[in-house]
Amino acid sequence: MNHTNSDRWISGLALAGLILVMLAFPAHAWAHGPSEGGASNDDVNRLFRIVLWIAIPIFLLVEGLIVYSIIRFRRRTEDEMPEQVEGNTLLEITWTVMAFVIVTVLFLLTLRALQTDYNVVAGNEDTTPDLTVRVTGYMFNWDYEYVLGDSEETGVMTTLTMTIPAGKNVLLEITSTDVQHSFWVPDLAGKVDAIPGYINTMWLNASKPGLYTGNCAEFCGLNHYNMLIEVDVLESAAFDVWLAEQMAAASEFQPMGIDLESSMPAGDAVRGAGVFNELACNACHQPEENQPSGPSIKNMMHDALSMDEMTADAYLREAILMPCAQLAAGWDQCIMPGNYGERLDAQGLADLIEYIKTY
Ligand SMILES: [Cu+2]
């Protein structure tokens, strides 16, 4: 019979295709595999390995029996019927009890891992963190505020990148100002939701310096895919230097607030481009038209020049410091963060405006 032969060819090709597809993606499959990045991850990894070692023999047993049965009991003649077996009480009780025992053991181990995860860094009784970072999610970014210990304000705030020391106990206090987000850096720790009006905590103790990346893990709007997380883990001494520099800069810093009146220094477009990235304005404003997250940066100057009652500079200044005061043409919702006045001084604002003008 010819068709069984071609059936074999088709299954063979399908299998080869599947293997090729699987070989093409291993980089993605492993990108967030178990890693050794941080202490709270160690518990998760331990749990993962235990489950893996329980699952491997079961997998081999089940697949082995399937393959054995396929070969041993295959149909040899057109009208052959296999022996009909109706139930086996002993076998059924055995596998029910075994499954129950396995699930119970995994449940208890998971419960233990959850507790060490959320209480304090594994094996450490100290409940005062070396550093606290207040993590605030908003569409579509994260702001980080640094606090020494659990209460000594530093005045340092960053966007885009969170910088922390290696080998120290860092407490994250995670919240959101708008909708629900989720903070997830797979190589450092598990996922913790960022919920408006509520603070969730997570302990980090990153073992190795390096740049760790993650993503908002809760669908939060059209630019959710681009709500990235970067954690820069520095050697403890390098972190102290970084923090001292940031604190010095923060103490000199004179935020604009909602000042729309005072005269401004001359701006510099190149520096402005840096500010635009640092404050992650580009998360919402790209050069492309018709983005759902914000007006194209290319249209800003056009919109600013078409204001009759104010100058282009005054319009851009107001649009940045008080985004809800008047919405850009075609927009009926204020989703731009309203706190840039706290993040910009007069020079930063002037630089930003100068940069927008280059489009
Ligand atoms: Cu989000």
Image (cartoon, rainbow, N blue to C red):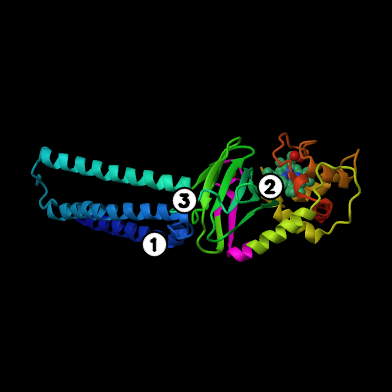
Q: CA distance from mark 2 to mark 3?
A: 43 Å
Label 1 crowd (10 A; few <14 / some 14-19 / many >=20): few
Label 2 crowd (10 A; few <14 / some 14-19 / many >=20): many
Q: CA distance from mark 1 to mark 3?
A: 49 Å
Depth-wise, is mark 1 or mark 2 nearer the camera?
2
Marks 2 and 3, the one that precedes in the sequence: 3
Q: Is residue 192 magenta?
A: no
**Element class at badge 2:** loop
Seen at 71% across and 41% down, the residue is 336
Marks 1 and 2, the one that precedes in the sequence: 1
Q: Is residue 222 magenta?
A: yes
Question: In the rendered structure, which amino acid carries the disc numbered 3?
Answer: Glu
Magenta-drawn segment: 214-239
Give the residue pinned by disc 3: 125
Give the residue pinned by disc 1: 20
**Element class at badge 1:** helix
* Image x and y of residue 249, in percent: 76, 57
Please indicate whether residue 210 sits to the left or right of residue 344 in the image. left
Seen at 63% across and 44% down, the residue is 136
Q: Which mark is residue 284?
A: 2
Marks 1 and 3, the one that precedes in the sequence: 1
* Image x and y of residue 297, in percent: 75, 50
Q: Quadrant of the C terminus?
A: bottom right
Please indicate whether residue 253 sits to the left or right of residue 177 in the image. right
Question: In the rendered structure, which amino acid carries the disc numbered 1?
Answer: Leu
